[in-house]
Image (cartoon, rainbow, N blue to C red):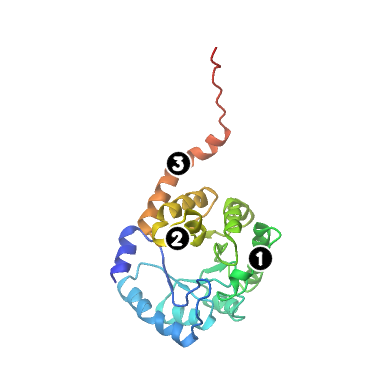
Amino acid sequence: RTRFDELVSEGAAIADLGAYSSRPGADEVSVTEEMERLRPALRILRDEYPDLPVSVDTFRSEVARMAVEEYGAAIINDISGGALDPEMYRTVAALQVPYILMHMKGNPQTMQSLTDYSDVTLEVIDYFAERIGKLLELGLHDIILDPGFGFSKTTEQNYELLMHLDDLTRTFTQPVLVGVSRKSMIYRPLGCTPAEALGGTTFLHALALERGAQILRVHDVRAAAEAITLYEQARPYLHRAEHLHYSFPRSH
């Protein structure tokens, strides 16, 4: 409860819950265990924080259905983009809840060995285009795109994708979500621990916002909310700054 109180007081717009770790090499968790891990937190959020939308991080259609039908979860966040459960697309279309479509190759156990791309940005765009088409055919229109930073991508590929994020935001009408908070793409180049990576996280949040990200998935809500507030303060001047050219008199 204390953590949920913090989320609300610091300005979180959505609470994202997951019971299957997606970190590289994570252990397998059964469907039953995943559900039982989620139920207590879902119950608290439903009963005590009814105004806080809940996103459930799962790639299993059975878990998604349970969370939505029994506890009123508002969003399904699928790290596999539907690849790990053939029933997921039909399930979220039937439930008519927003669906976060993430890019990943393989699964959490294998993804770090699947990092071959000719052009990571173009491959992510092609991946989204194909899957958005399938979801639209099934009647699901509320789709959020997550490029999957840290999932089946090297540090260099993560930065290439981040710096070309505006290619995604220009190509698709769906909102783009960015999740880079305290990830290895930050703490490894900095030579620090995840706990020490808040400054780097905030800098990358600013880059993502400037390139069109509309949702940030974060650990540190207050810092992210402050970054968004200051970005909104600066945004009216971004376009003007790109077109200003200053000339200075030469000294004699």
Picture residue at 59% right of the left edge, 76% below the top: 89
Q: Is residue 25 above or below residue 193?
A: below
Out of 188 and 116, give the one closest to the viewer: 188
- Figure check: 160 above or below 34: above
Badge 3 amino acid: Ala
- The CA distance from mark 2 to mark 1 is 26 Å
In the rendering, at what x and y percent does residue 209 appear?
Answer: 50, 51
Q: Nearer the viewer, mark 2 or mark 3?
A: 2
Which quadrant is the N terminus positioned in? bottom left
Helix, strand or loop under label 2:
loop
Q: Callout 3: helix, strand or loop?
A: helix
The one of 188 and 225 positioned closer to us in this rendering: 188
In this rendering, the answer to whether 237 lies above or below 229 is above
The crowd level at tag 3 (other Cα within 10 Å; few <14, some 14-19, many 20+) is: few
Looking at the figure, which quarter contains the C terminus?
top right
| Amino acid at pointer 2 | Arg
Could you say which disc has been placed on residue 230 in the image?
Answer: none
Question: Mark 3 and mark 2 in contact (Cβ < 8 Å)?
Answer: no
Q: Identify the mark at residue 234; answer none if there is no mark.
A: 3
The single residue placed furthest to the front in the displayed view is: 191
The residue that label 1 is drawn on is 127
Mark with earlier residue (2, 1): 1
Cα separation between marks 2 and 3: 25 Å
* The quarter of the displayed image where residue 9 is located: bottom left
Element class at badge 1: helix
The residue to which callout 2 is attached is: 182
Q: Position of residue 131 (x, y in %)?
A: 64, 69
Mark 1, Cα crowd under 10 Å, few <14 / some 14-19 / many 20+, is some
In which quarter of the view is residue 248 placed? top right
Residue 50 lies in what quarter of the image? bottom left
Residue 211: image location, x then y, percent? 55, 49
Mark 1: amino acid: Tyr
